[in-house]
Amino acid sequence: MFAVQDVEGYWEYLTHPAHVRSELEGIELLARFEAFDITDSDDPEIGAKIEQLQARHFAESPELAALAAQAPSFSVPGHEAPPPA
């Protein structure tokens, strides 16, 4: 679990080399990958902002997006399909 102050901090977390390395090395080891975020923000757009950052993260990391696409089970609660690659 990680706690961040705002969406800028969330982006720093997503792109931090240690986090990216854990994704690159860890996704292929998972039988199931379920991503979700919990927030206490009162911003009605926070969900969309988080989704945009996650999509940007995959768009800027094609190797990571390819690994996520190959995961046996990759889901985001509330979504029918995995995040965009």
Image (spheres, rainbow, N blue to C red):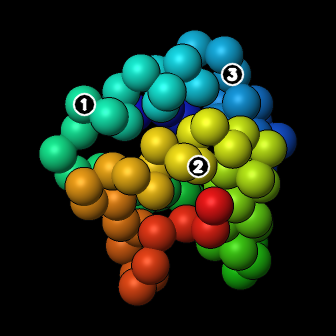
| Amino acid type assigned to the residue bearing label 2 in the image | Ala
| Amino acid type assigned to the residue bearing label 1 in the image | Leu
75 with respect to 6 (left or right): left
Q: Is residue 36 above or below residue 43?
A: above
Image coordinates of residue 47 in percent, x first then y, are 63, 72
- Closest to the camera, between mark 3 and mark 1, is 1
Mark 1, residues whose alpha carbon is within 10 Å: few (<14), some, or many (≥20)? few
Whether residue 82 is visible to the viewer of this picture, yes or no, is: yes
Q: Is residue 22 above or below residue 78?
A: above
Residue beneath the point at 58% across and 39% down? 64
Q: Which mark is residue 65?
A: 2
Q: Quadrant of residue 39?
A: bottom right
Residue beneath the point at 46% across and 56% down? 69
Image coordinates of residue 33 in percent, x first then y, are 30, 51
| Amino acid type assigned to the residue bearing label 3 in the image | His
Image coordinates of residue 43 in percent, x first then y, are 74, 72
Residue beneath the point at 46% across and 69% down? 82
Q: In this view, which residue lies farthest toward the left? A: 31
**Residue denoted by label 3:** 16
**Residue denoted by label 1:** 29
Mark 2, residues whose alpha carbon is within 10 Å: few (<14), some, or many (≥20)? some
The span from disc 3 to disc 1 (Cα, nearest Å) is: 20 Å
| Position of the C terminus by quadrant | bottom right
Element under label 3?
A: loop
Element under label 1?
A: helix
